[in-house]
Amino acid sequence: MFGFFNGNSAQKEREQRYHSLLHEAMQAQRSGDIRLYSELSEAADLLLKEIEKAEQTQA
């Protein structure tokens, strides 16, 4: 109900975006668009690094 009290909501949004990017990349690869696949994969990798960095600062 009071999601703004939850400090992990931004983290969850990042994780959802990461999974979304991976899914989009998979779909691009299946359709044969390798350039888009590599762009989306790179964006997902950068986002994963952000997620890992945020987790390290919380610990």
Image (cartoon, rainbow, N blue to C red):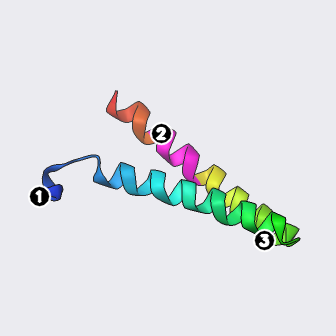
Badge 3 local density, few (<14 within 10 Å), some, or many (20+)?
A: some
Q: Which residue is mark 1?
A: 1
Residue assigned mark 3: 36
Circle 2 is placed at which residue position?
53
Which amino acid type is marked by label 1? Met
- Eye-nearest disc, 3 or 1: 1
Indicate the quadrant containing the N terminus: top left, top right, bottom left or bottom right. bottom left
Residue 54 x %, y %? 41, 41
Q: Which residues are magenta?
A: 47-53
**View extreme (top): residue:** 59
Relative side of 57 to 24, left or right: left
- Which secondary structure is most common in the magenta stretch? helix
Mark 3 residue type:
Leu
Quadrant into which the C terminus falls? top left
Q: Is residue 48 magenta?
A: yes
Helix, strand or loop at label 1? It is loop
Q: Is 43 situated above or below 51?
A: below
Q: Residue at x 83, y 72 (%)?
A: 31
- Residue plotted at (17% across, 57% down): 3
Residue 29, how many percent across, how many down?
82, 64
The Cα atoms of the two marked residues, 3 and 1, are separated by 38 Å
Q: Are marks 2 and 1 in contact (CB under 8 Å)?
A: no
Name which residue lies at 77% across and 69% down: 28
Q: Are marks 3 and 1 in contact (CB under 8 Å)?
A: no
Q: Is residue 22 left or right of residue 36?
A: left
